[in-house]
Image: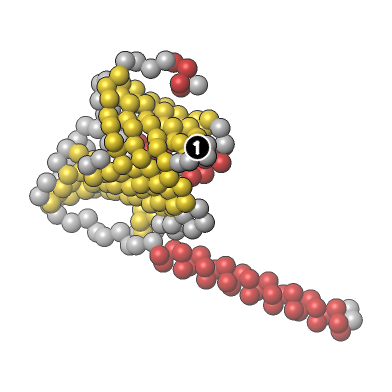
Amino acid sequence: MRATDASRAQTSRHVRLIIITALAALLSAAAACAPRAPALEGTVAPKRLPPTGLPPVHQKVIFQWTYSDRDFRAKGEGAARIAPPDSVRIDLFVGGGLGGASAVLIGDDVRISGDEQVRSYLPPVPLMWASLGRVAVPPAQDTSARVTGDTLRVDIGHDPRWRVMFVGDSLRRLDLIDGDRIRQWMMRQGRRVQYQQIQTRRMLDFTITRVDTVPAFDAAIWQ
């Protein structure tokens, strides 16, 4: 190999090393941004959750929503049509008539209508159900529960694990914890529902404006 070729090869190796080192640093920094999950506190409690099934009626929920991440922001109106025991259709409409998207959630199955890219913006299924007050976390043997006053916290699974928080009988928050750090969470407080994916800074914020009890929905909406 000529000297110039050897020099170019060495330079290329240095560049690759710099890129790999930079990527590793970025990933480490992103991981460090995720807050550490605090240890469960309080009195040991039975490993039982309050019932969280959907109401035994069909409902139409109207809400305002906002979305943001590092590169994109949007807001608009939406509707969720909920049918017990485990079905919901969510329609999002972007403000200014700029389009919309729909997702159907039946049990653990998510179906997207329209732009399939929407799927990448959706929270994991357990967090989607948590936004409606329903716990749908995969069962696991590694479970611990503690209670402080009227607040019950239950950890389910291990790396990753789910932390469920109830205030009274109401689901208030669900965290996805991996490596002892909170990676994603969903929180419900009154008519407001918030979701955040920590590392991507992805945030969804819903404010419920109306909840109506309605007749059974046409079967076509689930297709």
* Quadrant in the rendering for residue 123: top left
**What residue is at 52 percent from the left and 44 percent from the top?**
120
Residue 131 versus residue 137: which sits nearer the camera? 131
Inspect this view and state whether residue 3 appears: yes
* Quadrant in the rendering for residue 8: bottom right
Residue 20 versus residue 90: which sits nearer the camera? 90
Inspect this view and state whether residue 84 appears: no
Q: Count all numbered tags in the image, as a single digit.
A: 1
**What residue is at 52 percent from the left and 71 percent from the top?**
25
Which amino acid lies under the numbered mark 1 shown in the image of this protein?
Gly
Q: Which residue is mark 1?
A: 97
**What residue is at 14 percent from the left and 54 percent from the top?**
42
Crowdedness of circle 1 by 10 Å Cα count: few (<14), some, many (20+)?
Answer: few
53 relative position to 195: left or right: left
| 5 lies above or below 148 | below
Q: Position of residue 15 (x, y in %)?
A: 69, 75
| 31 lies above or below 59 | below
Q: Position of residue 14 (x, y in %)?
A: 69, 77
**What residue is at 61 percent from the left and 69 percent from the top?**
20
Q: Quadrant of the N terminus?
A: bottom right
Q: Position of residue 68 (x, y in %)?
A: 44, 52
55 relative position to 107: left or right: left
